[in-house]
Image (tube, rainbow, N blue to C red):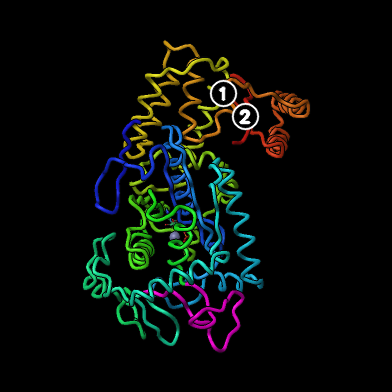
Amino acid sequence: MNTIQLFNTLGRQKQVFKPLKDGAMGMYVCGPTVYDRASIGNLRAYVFADVLRRMFEASGYSVTHVMNITDVGHLVSDADDGEDKLEKGARREGKTAWEVADAYTKLFLRDLQRMNTLTPSVMPKATDHIAEQIEMIRAIEQKGLTYTTSDGVYFSTEKLPGYGRLSGQKLADKEAGARVEIGEKHHASDFALWKFSPKDEVRHMEWESPWGKGFPGWHIECSAMAEKYLGMPFDIHTGGIDHIAVHHENELAQAEAARGVLEANYWLHNEFLLIDGGKMSKSLGNTYSLDDLATKGISPLAYRYFVLGAHYKSSLNFTWESAQAAQNALNKLVDTVRTWDKPTTVDQASFEAFMAFMRDDLDSVQALALVWKLVGDDMLPSAVKAATLLAYDEVLGLALEDVVARPLKLSSEAQALLDARQAARSAKDFQRSDELRAEFAKLGLQVEDTIDGQRVRELR
Ligand code: AMP
Ligand code: ZN
């Protein structure tokens, strides 16, 4: 098999990927906390994981892709105090935490589908795996690495000699940097494995356990579900860079304490999406969803194209202008490939060049440049370009199979609108012409006035 190189946060360098089992790759993708709509920042993490999976599949691997749904236990603060995000979402919406989780899980999965990401092999929910989490906490307890406070069972990080190996932070540095009140915890880096239900409050989600009624801490769900569906160790763990210092560090610690192995061999982290050069935040009102993008004419696939335009290890700055540029580029690509002849044979040299970039730590920037090189190649017949581009798209995932060599066919309704709009424009009735543009939008179509007349395209 061809060499695949990936930047491993554990070890801090690009490494040649060696699977645990020949021809197979198991990956665990930290899933969303389903208490609110996913932001386009969150979605960057899932486009990244999807492209990673597609690259492995295109390289001949059989991939097991596990993505969890965090529907309990992720607290507002990383220091293990503050409210459970799900209970908070429930209060905000006057619903139960179960209803909130269900509603946002559905919206999240729809978002993924709109960006043409492949469905994970398994999507386990934390609330369906309480027994597995309790069992793993017991194993850690039996190794003597836990202690109990008035509000929960905690992992004692000072008792695990290698703690901090993922982020490279020494325990002492973490303590010094911590500005948080540690309460009854022994060290700032200690974290909850099990939290007790508050005495004065009934939680929507709570379970009996050997330590008392309560709910699992956030990190334990991922270790327990990863082990159940992938075994331990497994090949690749992914998430955004914010997960390195706390969530993934703690997952690694739990696995090491409970099972005596490193949880995963390769830890891959995507950099953040920024908005106008800064952080996305509720208070700035810039935590956009895919729907917010759609209202400004940016489609989910154009957002995917936008994400591919940066290496996953570079931060990516979202502005409406840069998003519109991605939409324009995708429109241009679609308009062009619709006119191509039906796909015949793949140009292997071109495909290999493309895969070489993707196998080199997912260099989607160079890979996209090859897309445009292929489009502009005057020597290759369009039927070969079509086949080659579709092979690229197995990895890029821009759903180009729907448009390559498929000229847009207008319905009779759309054709009638087009004729009416042409008439309005000839009569210089621009108000009517704009009204008709809005009618097009209702059909999922966009009309543009060019020097050659009206051009219609599907919104995609
Ligand atoms: P959460 O729902 O908070 O658990 O986050 C879901 C995923 O999104 C995690 O992998 C985070 O690391 C990732 N993430 C959160 N914010 C951003 C961002 N602005 N850019 C890229 N990834 C992000
Ligand atoms: Zn996780």
Query: Could you say where residue 82 lies in the image, as x and y percent from the top left?
Result: 46, 77
Query: Could you say where residue 87 lies in the image, as x and y percent from the top left?
Result: 57, 73
Res 90 → quadrant? bottom right
Q: Are marks 1 and 2 in contact (CB under 8 Å)?
A: no
Q: Which residue is mark 2?
A: 457
Residue at screen point 31% across, 73% down? 189
Query: Could you say where residue 12 lies in the image, as x and y percent from the top left?
Result: 25, 51
Confirm whether residue 298 shows in the render.
no
In the image, is residue 43 above or below residue 197? above
Confirm whether residue 14 shows in the render.
yes
- Ligand 2 is found in the corner quadrant, namely bottom left
User: Where residue 418 is drawn, which disc sits there?
Assistant: none
Residue at screen point 36% across, 66% down? 250
Reply yes or no: does residue 314 show up in magenta: no
Which residue is at the front of the view, 345 or 154?
Answer: 154
What secondary structure characterizes most of the magenta part? loop
Residue density around tag 2, few if under 14, some if 14–19, many if 20 or more, within 10 Å: some
Reply yes or no: does residue 204 show up in magenta: yes
In the visual, does 244 lie left or right of 343?
left
Magenta span: 191-216
The kind of residue on which mark 2 rests is Arg
Disc 1/disc 2 C-alpha distance (Å): 14 Å
In the image, is residue 440 above or below residue 451? below
User: Is tag 1's residue or tag 2's residue first in the polypeptide sequence?
Assistant: 1
The number of callouts visible is 2
Which residue is at the front of the view, 443 or 436?
Answer: 443
Helix, strand, or loop for circle 1? loop
User: Where residue 404 is drawn, which disc sits there?
Assistant: 1
Q: Quadrant of the N terminus?
A: top left
Which residue is at the front of the view, 212 or 384?
Answer: 212
